Amino acid sequence: MNEMMTAALSITADACKTPQKYFRSTLSIDQKSDESPVTVADRETEGFLRRELLKRFPDHGIFGEEFGRETGNSAYEWIIDPIDGTRSFISGNPLYGMLLGLLKDEKPQFGIVRMPELDEVYSGDGKTAFKDAKEPLATSQTKDLSTAALYINEGEKIAAAHPTLFQRLCTTGQLRRFAYDCYPHMLLASGHIDAVIDYDLQPYDYLPLICVVQGAGGIMTDWDGNDLTLQSDGRVISAANQDIHASLLELIKHS
């Protein structure tokens, strides 16, 4: 596993050069069937990751956002989001990420989150987690949701689908920020904030994050408190600890 983690860190480091060369340049933007945008940077980045992974691990499966799922002859499968936050990327916002996770029998083994424009990388195996492969990560010890720092991801989608919950979230905690994509979950793993509520995610959006959040001492589940899997419905909570997690589950249940 250490060998695979080392290889994945190296491959993702090299892969960052692709989105960086396109960032804040004029790009042709296509719309996928779900009306989400995609660019040449998304496709080239995933293509690079796939090629490099298969060079080293030819029997592994790969599941990526842009080119779908290829089964291998192994229990191992890589899951890729080449540019997590394409809308951020095309609007010049540097808070897009690159996500790579390893699954075994569809269960997360480790995850890597790179922030190409910030020159940061987060990695974890569910037991430990690190920033830049050397700085240990630890979630906060805030226990009371009323004093917590809460990030609300995909707020407009939550507002449209769950207006009562959205209104409650807007008055929950001591500090609230609206955000998108993977970086709030890394802020949580780093101990800067206490909770993230997210919505309408795909497996490649959340599975690479789990081992980082949990390795830092946090909890990441669906809105019912269940473990996240390939079959989860895309509603996600990250919490710094059991107390914050339980309080958020109660808030959702009664909204």
Image: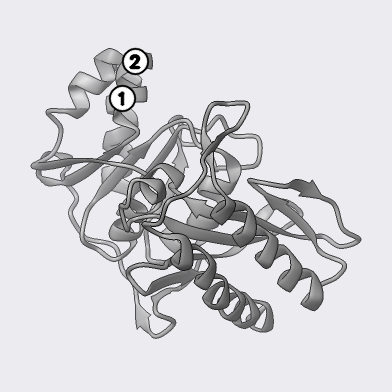
Query: Which structural element holds mark 1?
Result: helix
Vertical relation: 195 (above or below) 225: below
Res. 108 visible in picture: no
82 vs 140, nearest the viewer: 82
Res. 69 visible in picture: yes
64 vs 184, nearest the viewer: 64
Q: Which residue is mark 1?
A: 156
Q: Which residue is mark 2?
A: 160
Query: Number of marks in the image?
Result: 2
Which residue occupies 34% across, 42% down?
A: 180
Q: CA distance from mark 1 to mark 2?
A: 6 Å
Residue type, numbered disc 1: Glu
**How busy is the neighbourhood of tag 2: few (under 14 within 10 Å), some, or many (20 plus)?**
few
Q: In the image, residue 181 lies at what x, y percent?
A: 39, 46
Is residue 197 left or right of 164 when viewed as pictured?
right
Query: Which structural element holds mark 2?
Result: helix
Q: In the image, residue 100 lies at what x, y percent?
A: 58, 61
Which residue occupies 49% across, 62% down?
A: 19
225 vs 31, nearest the viewer: 31
